[in-house]
């Protein structure tokens, strides 16, 4: 092993991150580029996104490709068996030396958030995915394709439930809710029909995941309908996580239940409480961990795994803290 | 009143129908053209669709524009107050003599299916809308914009619940269901992941409302998950209909609950039973009527209303039967 650095790449639908660390877990450079999911930007587009993020990280670290000894790729769009060869061909073009690990990005979050790379990760951004790995190395992942094939879809799902509740209140089918006023105000509309007319006629954008924050705010203020929506979202995510727990026979083990993605950034207790309750019903020893570090930290740890370099707790703590710091400061200033 | 004929126009998202009857309720001609919802085809496109259907109906009837004494327009896309002037300008260009009635197409179905033009119509095609009118002339209508603002969305909703159940069975979150095999076979796929991969990668079309028939079939064969989905769809539609009943203070009246649209063509007892139960809870005297005639028959009756010509039961029965027959035979041969 000639190089003394590892690189981690996390590619998502809107951004691609690369981070470089030395073998003691010190982060020495990072880079960011645009969308890196090949399903959206094509294989050449994915290559460009990976390459640009890596080159920026190398520049910041002041090192060359030959200083790299291993890489970890956590890639959105690596969904099916047939995608492995497809994405391996992209990775070969990057021309980084050494062994690598290649996984779906959900497993990057699991590696970053769990102490031993095992457990279950619930990733809830605009959509959601639940992924798990047990100590025998078996893995399982939900489709993560929105609500169509069984996943409750994260922030978008919360907002969809909110608009449904606003509609039901207007029809007189459900109770009045402060969500109506909150959404009307957020859109600068006059009333609910005005809001719906604007959205349905394309004069205003359809409610999207960004409004999930509003649902949490209205719930926090005590609105019963909003509270029910948040609680149900937690239950939905928890029921799916519990199913993954059972798939991997983790019921009687102690493991990390990693919560990752923007939806958990609100630290909503109702959401996390309902989620945890569902998982603990079948796995009482699950430890809830909120992933503070960026998922690309998991890609770095996967690079250590590929290199066969152990990642003792002290190294992990340092690496996660530095990766977090990097994104809060240097990464944010780019 | 110089003319001795009335014309009804029903414009939807995929087709526009025109039907002409004499003042005794005999159907003498009809015409069909393409999409007539101005939201999709623009105001000029809507004009063309209306005009082509009307001209075809006039030709078949062997009469001229001047033989018409009144018209009834039931138009999809007439959703908001601001649409009235918009669509009146289109209607003026059609240059048909006499008075007219102009309503959202949901009210055309209500007029066709109810004995006195009052009651509640549940229209469930790909999406769904519930519309009602009481004997004081007050009306109410749900947004009919899919599931986003409170409507359960008809056939598309049934299929969405089915794919969600298939996903849950695959994750191990919900019970196994015969829907999985039925959908896999319908797509010519190998198994559920193969099906999901094909759909998610655009190699096969996403499940749409046409597959609702499959959900009914699997439910009829006794599959519990499919039965639950069908029952819930009926409850959803029934709860919304009950809300419209309350909005119009119809609880203690006898009225027609009109079921219209493709979803009811399957005459699924579980669906209709669950729907009826919800409505009868608040309105015990509701009479369930399945609309067999095409909705454009309602537009014809609205034309009689506009002309001030009474529509006694015998006339309605004849007109609905002839309109139905027209669509089954002559209309179908075009």
Image (spheres, coloured by chain):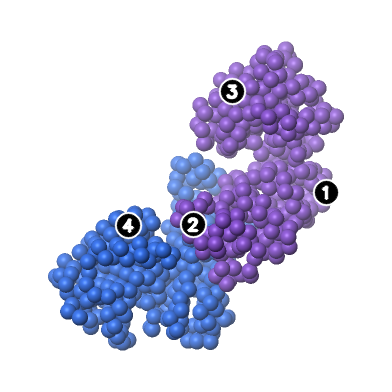
Chain colours: A blue, B purple
Q: Mark 1 or mark 2: which comes first in sequence?
A: 2
- Residue visible at 42% across and 79% down in the picture: A289
- Residue visible at 46% across and 42% down in the picture: A202
Cα separation, mark 1 vs mark 4, equals: 63 Å
Res B285 label? 1
- Tell whether label 4 touches label 3 (CB within 8 Å): no
Q: Mark 3 or mark 1: which comes first in sequence?
A: 3
Does label 1 lie on the same chain as label 3?
A: yes
Does label 2 lie on the same chain as label 3?
A: yes
Cα separation, mark 3 vs mark 4, equals: 49 Å
As drawn, is B93 to the left or to the right of A261? right
The residue carrying pointer 1 sits among few (fewer than 14), some (14 to 19) or many (20 or more) residues within 10 Å by Cα, namely some
Res B198 label? 2
- Tell whether label 4 touches label 2 (CB within 8 Å): no
Res B51 label? 3
Q: Chain of mark 1?
A: B
In the rendered image, is residue B93 in sight? yes
Does label 2 lie on the same chain as label 1?
A: yes
Residue A225, given in percent of the width and then of the height, sits at 58, 62
- Snapshot quadrant of residue A39: bottom left
Cα separation, mark 2 vs mark 4, equals: 18 Å
The residue carrying pointer 4 sits among few (fewer than 14), some (14 to 19) or many (20 or more) residues within 10 Å by Cα, namely some
As drawn, is B83 to the left or to the right of A131? right
Which quadrant holds the N terminus of chain B?
A: top right
As drawn, is B175 to the left or to the right of B26? left
Check the image and report above or below for B203 versus B141: below
Res A43 label? 4
Check the image and report above or below for B179 versus B248: below
Residue closest to the eye, B47 or B141: B47
């Amino acid at each position: 092993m000639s190089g003394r650095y590892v690189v981690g790449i996390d590619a998502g639908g809107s951004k691609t991150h690369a981070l470089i660390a030395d073998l003691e877990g010190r982060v020495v450079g990072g880079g960011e580029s645009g969308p890196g999911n090949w399903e959206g930007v094509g294989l050449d587009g994915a290559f460009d996104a990976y390459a640009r993020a890596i080159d920026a990280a190398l520049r910041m670290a002041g090192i060359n490709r030959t200083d790299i000894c291993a890489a970890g790729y956590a890639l959105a769009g690596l969904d099916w068996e047939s995608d492995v060869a497809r994405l391996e061909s992209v990775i070969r073009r990057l021309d980084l030396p050494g062994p690598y690990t290649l996984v779906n990005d959900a497993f990057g979050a699991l590696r970053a958030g769990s102490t031993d790379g095992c457990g279950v990760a619930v990733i809830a951004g605009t959509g959601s995915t639940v992924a798990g790995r047990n100590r025998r190395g078996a893995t399982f992942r939900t489709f993560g394709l929105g609500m169509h094939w069984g996943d409750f879809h994260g922030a978008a799902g919360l907002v969809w439930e909110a608009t449904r509740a606003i509609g039901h209140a207007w029809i007189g089918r459900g109770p009045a809710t402060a969500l109506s006023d909150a959404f009307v105000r957020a859109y600068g509309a006059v009333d609910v029909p005005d809001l719906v007319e604007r959205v349905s006629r394309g004069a205003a954008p359809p409610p999207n995941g960004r409004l999930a924050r509003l649902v949490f705010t209205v719930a926090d203020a005590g609105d019963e309908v909003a509270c029910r929506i948040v609680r149900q979202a937690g239950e939905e995510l928890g029921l799916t996580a519990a199913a993954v727990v059972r798939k991997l026979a983790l019921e009687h083990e102690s493991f990390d239940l990693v919560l990752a993605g923007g939806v958990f950034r609100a630290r909503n207790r109702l959401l996390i409480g309902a989620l945890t309750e569902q998982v603990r019903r079948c796995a009482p020893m699950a430890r809830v961990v909120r992933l503070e570090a960026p998922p690309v930290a998991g890609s770095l740890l996967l690079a250590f795994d590929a290199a066969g370099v152990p990642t003792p707790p002290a190294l992990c703590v340092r690496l996660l803290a530095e990766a977090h710091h990097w994104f809060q400061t240097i990464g944010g200033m780019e």
